[in-house]
Amino acid sequence: MLSLSEYAIEINGLVKKFGDLTAVNGVNLRIKKGEIFGLLGPNGAGKSTTINMLLGLLAPTSGKISVNGIDMLKNPERAKGQIGIVTQETVVEPELTAEDNLMIFGRLYQIPADELRKDIDFALKLSDLESFRKAYAGTFSGGMKRRLETAKALMHAPQILLLDEPTTGLDVQNRTKIWELLRKINKEDNVTILMTTQYLEEADQLCNRIAIIDHGKLIALGTPSELRQKIGMSTILEVSGDKEMLPKIAQMFRKAGLEPQTLTNKVLASAGSKPVEKIEKILKLLSASKIDVRNVSLHEPTIDDVFLKLTGSEVRDETGSFKGGRGMIMRRG
Amino acid sequence: MGLLNDTYTLLLRELLIFKKNFKVNIIRSMIFPIIFIILLGAFGSTPKNVPVALVNYDNGPASLQFMNLLQSGNSVRVVSSTTQQAAMNLLSEGDVAAVIVIPGGFSRSQIPKPDVYVYLDNSQPQSAVVVNQVVNQASSEMAGRLAAGTAPGSTPNPVPVVSNYAYGAASNYESFVVGGLVIMVAAFGSVFSAGFSVISDRELGNLKAFLTTPINKFAILLSKIGYGTMQSLLSAYIGLAIGIALGATVAAGFIGLLELIWIVFLVGLGFGSLSIALAARSKQLQTYALIGQTIVMPTAFLGGAFVPISLLPPVLQSVSVVNPLTYAVNAVRAVMIKGSLPLGDLVVDSAVLLAFAAVMVAIAFVLFRNTSEQLS
């Protein structure tokens, strides 16, 4: 589809109020065509509200959203047609076959009847579910459902794909399959991708640019390496241990002349210019005080650290279903 | 074009899901009527003080004695009438449940005795059964007394009684119960499909997914109402089929069954929309199911589905006047028991149900409009 706008998504002065609460407070964002863009933010930061407005589910209090140059508020049906969506909850109908799931959504996305057959075949192939065409989606594994849903979102060949935490809860194998799929459609079909994720490493690896949103405002925007440089953090010293030990560990950090930040299961601090010296000091202090720790490490700042520094919180507290950690994510190469 | 096409797509989805669960759906639609008919069939209550009009063309001692016998229990209350015509008017207006005619010459010692004629309103089957019992009892009692010489005349034969039904079919309690049951399962059918699927679609995230597609959101509403109405028709006709298998009769025959499609359709439309209005406001499936049940059961009951409205307390009788199901039940009974749906009844019943459905559809539209805001 031809469009004059050079941006896939343009958000101008977006505000959403729920009564007294301002969930989104003047967000401006331009996402270029062909970009893979990550939108990050802690829970309650306004991320979901922004996404819901982009999906046309919520009407903004003020501001403007356009999708491929089409105004979402004035022309919601056309604008929605430009976007493919993979939501947080896996939405496939368990009582329908893979094929019928695709058929229903193909029709809702206004795919003409004579092309529908072909598009269903394409989607089944894309999601590697050709041999499960006639199987009910209720019998699928979590990963298969997610692939089916992703294929469903791509069936009408949207120019923009919006993914709300696409890999949450998936195992490494299925996660990798989704990543491959996203890279492939971005590269081959020039599909613009806007995604939210709890796995910051995922954003680091997949996204060309990242925006961090907190308290309803954009607080950072740039490429992953730009963001890392921007906060100017040196090597990070991190000590993890049992919860009750954390205050003591933090005390040791202060003794060593570090500014500790305590999270749910670890204490960390910027190690300054002499990281090896600092780690030696900490190790000595810890063993002298007989404090049990699980792990002591030095690492380069990651997006998690950037996020932590900027928002003062982890991407999601550990009480949620998400058990995060970079160990879960397979490194590329 | 767009709205209709999207509605069709979403309805197709409901039907494909229905097809997958076909057996379970059909069995579920069957269980309720079977249990209900068997249970209620066994509990056919016996009313007291059933009003009957008595026309006495004899006025001899035997007829007076017969009259006293009729009134000896308190099963019937006799209203005297001077002419058969006047009595029949009372019957057709529903003021009395039966007309008993004692012919002239009843007291004369003539053999055989002339027949006592009984005209019964079989749209009130319980009452009809009671009147028949009382008349037959009085008749054999008379015969006994005559034989023992305690009454004037000396005929040992029982007084012959001829019973006539006011309407086409010889009614039974099953027909009465099935008439009400059909309407109740129709209402339940739509409440437990239309609104129910709105809630489960919301919980599963399907509703959100539909709303993010380029469709008119009212297509979702229309498809759910359509699905509810289909389920109403299915439940009602399964209920009818089971009722007939268990002994109910349809006086108006096959044509009557076709007439009922319109009535059941309106019930489904109204209650389906009502259920969507409910679903738009209740967050949990349990809450919804509870509310749904507490609406349908009393409404059906107050509509005279299982107990004639004339037996309800006066306060509840006035509620029945504004109850849409009263009119639906009336229409089904007319077809099953009276043998046809009179044009006047059809117009009134349809008008009330149509108005009810229209109001409910409008409410459903208004409440459904904000659905997407509530989802987020």
Image: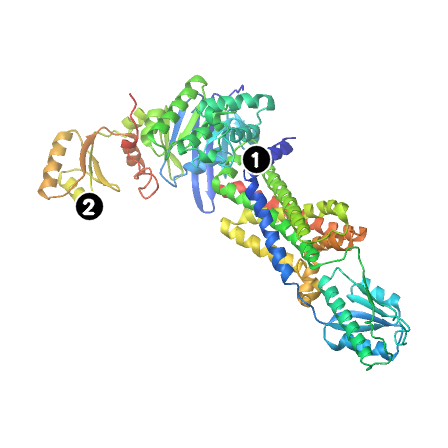
Q: Residue at x 32, y 41 (%)?
A: A317
The mark lying in front, picked from 1 and 2, is: 1
Q: Is residue A301 above or below residue B85?
A: above
Q: Which mark is residue B245?
A: none
Output the chain of dot 1: B
* Image coordinates for residue A151, horizontal then vertical, percent: 47, 26
Is residue A9 among the parts visible in the rendering?
A: no
Viewer-side residue, A242 vs A118: A118
Is A21 displayed left or right of B59 in the figure?
left
* Image coordinates for residue A2, horizontal then vertical, percent: 54, 19
Residue that carries the numbered disc 1 in the rendered image: B16
Is A321 displayed left or right of B309 in the figure?
left
Is A76 displayed left or right of B327 in the figure?
left
Viewer-side residue, A272 vs B3: B3
Q: Residue at x 83, y 81 (%)?
A: B151
Q: What element does badge 2 sit on?
A: helix
Residue B7: which quarter of the image?
top right
Task: Please name the amino acid that badge 2 sits on.
Answer: Pro
Q: Quadrant of the N terminus of chain B?
A: top right
Number of numbered discs overlaid on the protein picture:
2
Is residue A233 among the parts visible in the rendering?
A: yes
Q: Is residue B95 above or below residue A250?
A: below
Task: Please name the amino acid that badge 1 sits on.
Answer: Leu
Real-space Cα distance between discs 1 and 2?
59 Å
* Image coordinates for residue B17, horizontal then vertical, percent: 55, 37
* Image coordinates for residue A212, horizontal then vertical, percent: 36, 33
Residue that carries the numbered disc 2 in the rendered image: A247
